[in-house]
């Protein structure tokens, strides 16, 4: 696979998964299995250890794009950086904290909603710490997967709006980051292993 110029987005590297170039035209949610198949197919044409004319830089670009697209938080952060009027990168902690502070200051309801979300994160952290076996995490995993699904549904609706409510989208993306981090912590859980949820 020859890439002579940088693609307009990581979505453009996966034309089967994003035939219209990515959200909002294609929608935000993905079929993870189909994306993985497309990734492997593209890498089979690009990886220097597999393809005779493979390119390690192209292969690295495709790998990075896949890691971002498959993660719903990084996916929406990529969309925001591409399309926000100020091209903000919410994966930068200072930028995320700035938006959190600004939105909390807009109304008591916004502040309460954010604090309620943090309480849910703290409860999840406690459940992880108290777990003795993987089965102890079944309910937490089910609840957290539902939160991720709800967040992706909300993001789909926000992306379909014209104009996009950027503050709402960014705050939903930040909430999604928490749920994705909890999902990763559940996946990596081991008995006696210390729990660290990155924020």
Image (cartoon, grey):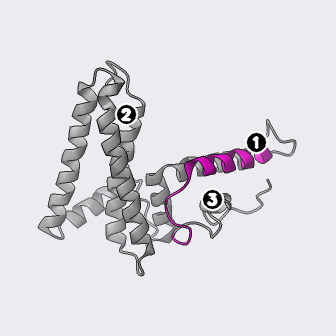
Q: Residue at x 87, y 41 (%)?
A: 52
The residue singled out by tag 3 in the image is 17
Look at discs 1 and 2 and give the one toward the viewer.
Answer: 2
Q: Earlier in the sequence, mark 1 or mark 3?
A: 3
Write down the quadrant of residue 133 in the picture: top left
Extreme residue toward the right, this view:
52
Does residue 90 lie above or below 120 as drawn? Answer: below
Left or right, 101 with respect to 43, comes to left
Tell me the quarter of the image containing the C terminus: top left
Residue 5, position as x, y percentages in the image: 73, 63
Around disc 3, counting alpha carbons within 10 Å, would you say few (fewer than 14), some (14 to 19), or many (20 or more)?
A: many
Of helix, strand and loop, which mostly describes the magenta segment? helix
The residue singled out by tag 1 in the image is 47
Q: Residue at x 63, y 70 (%)?
A: 20
Residue 3, position as x, y percentages in the image: 76, 58
Residue 87 can be seen in this image: yes
Around disc 1, counting alpha carbons within 10 Å, would you say few (fewer than 14), some (14 to 19), or many (20 or more)?
A: many
The magenta stretch is 24-47
Residue 95 can be seen in this image: no
Q: Earlier in the sequence, mark 2 or mark 3?
A: 3
- CA gap, disc 1 and disc 3: 20 Å
Extreme residue toward the top, this view:
192
């Amino acid at each position: 696979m020859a890439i002579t110029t940088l693609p307009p987005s990581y979505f453009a590297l996966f034309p089967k998964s994003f035939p219209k170039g990515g959200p909002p035209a294609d929608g935000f949610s993905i079929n993870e299995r189909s994306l993985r198949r497309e990734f492997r197919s593209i890498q089979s044409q690009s990886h220097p250890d597999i393809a005779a004319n493979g390119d390690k830089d192209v292969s690295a670009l495709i790998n990075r794009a896949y890691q971002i697209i498959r993660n719903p938080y990084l996916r929406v952060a990529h969309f925001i950086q591409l399309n926000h009027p100020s091209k903000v990168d919410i994966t930068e902690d200072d930028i995320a904290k700035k938006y959190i502070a600004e939105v909390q200051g807009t109304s008591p309801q916004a502040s309460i909603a954010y604090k309620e979300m943090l309480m849910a994160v703290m409860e999840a952290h406690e459940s992880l710490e108290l777990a003795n076996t993987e089965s102890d995490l079944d309910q937490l995993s089910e609840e957290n997967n539902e939160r991720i699904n709800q967040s992706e549904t909300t993001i789909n609706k926000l992306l379909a709006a014209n104009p996009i409510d950027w503050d709402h989208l960014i705050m939903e993306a930040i909430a999604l980051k928490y749920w994705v981090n909890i999902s990763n912590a559940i996946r990596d859980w081991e008995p006696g292993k210390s729990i660290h949820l990155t924020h």
